[in-house]
Image: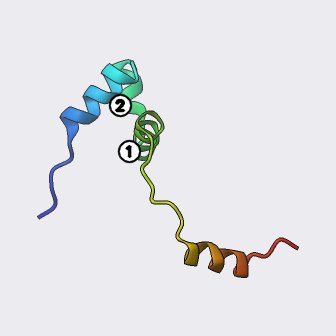
């Protein structure tokens, strides 16, 4: 079963953190809201491994 969408948190973030009007909040697409959340909270990503970096350098050489 898919978990329910966290409406309470989404509305709280949109109205409380982003300070959007309710009209502006409801006009956002889910993707726009997700991008705004990531911009404010930051996105935790793992650093590149040496193997991944080497692979990228091989596939996309500088010259």
Instruction: Classify 10 Å Cα crowding around label 2: few (below 14), some (14-19), many (20 and above).
Output: few
Q: Is residue 57 above or below residue 21?
A: below
- Asked which secondary structure carries label 2, the reply is helix
The quarter of the image holding the C terminus is: bottom right
Q: Position of residue 43 (x, y in %)?
A: 44, 47
Q: Residue at x 48, y 37 (%)?
A: 39
Query: Which quadrant holds residue 26?
Result: top left
Structural distance between the alpha carbons of marks 1 and 2 = 10 Å
- Asked which secondary structure carries label 1, the reply is helix
Q: Is residue 56 above or below residue 41?
A: below
Outermost residue to the front: 50
The quarter of the image holding the N terminus is: bottom left
To which residue does mark 1 refer?
Answer: 30
Q: Residue at x 16, y 61 (%)?
A: 2
* Residue 19 or residue 23, whichever sits in front: 19
Q: Which mark is residue 20?
A: none
Looking at the image, residue 4 sits to the left or right of residue 47; the answer is left
Q: Which mark is residue 26?
A: 2
Looking at the image, residue 58 sits to the left or right of residue 11; the answer is right
Q: Residue at x 37, y 28 (%)?
A: 25
Nearer the observer, disc 1 or disc 2?
A: 1
Query: Which quadrant holds residue 53?
Result: bottom right
Q: Is residue 60 above or below residue 45?
A: below
Outermost residue to the left: 1
Q: Position of residue 33 (x, y in %)?
A: 40, 39
Q: Position of residue 54 (x, y in %)?
A: 65, 77
User: Looking at the image, what colour scheme do you see?
Assistant: rainbow
Q: Position of residue 12 (x, y in %)?
A: 26, 26
* Residue 5 or residue 58, whichever sits in front: 58
Instruction: Classify 10 Å Cα crowding around label 1: few (below 14), some (14-19), many (20 and above).
Output: few
Looking at the image, residue 22 sits to the left or right of residue 60; the answer is left
* Residue 8 or residue 53, whichever sits in front: 53
């Amino acid at each position: 079963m898919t978990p329910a969408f966290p409406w309470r948190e989404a509305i709280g973030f949109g109205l409380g953190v982003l300070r959007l009007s309710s009209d502006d909040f409801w006009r956002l697409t889910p993707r726009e809201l997700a991008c705004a959340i990531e911009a404010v909270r930051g996105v935790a990503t793992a650093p590149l491994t040496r193997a991944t970096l080497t692979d990228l350098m091989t596939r996309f050489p500088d010259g």
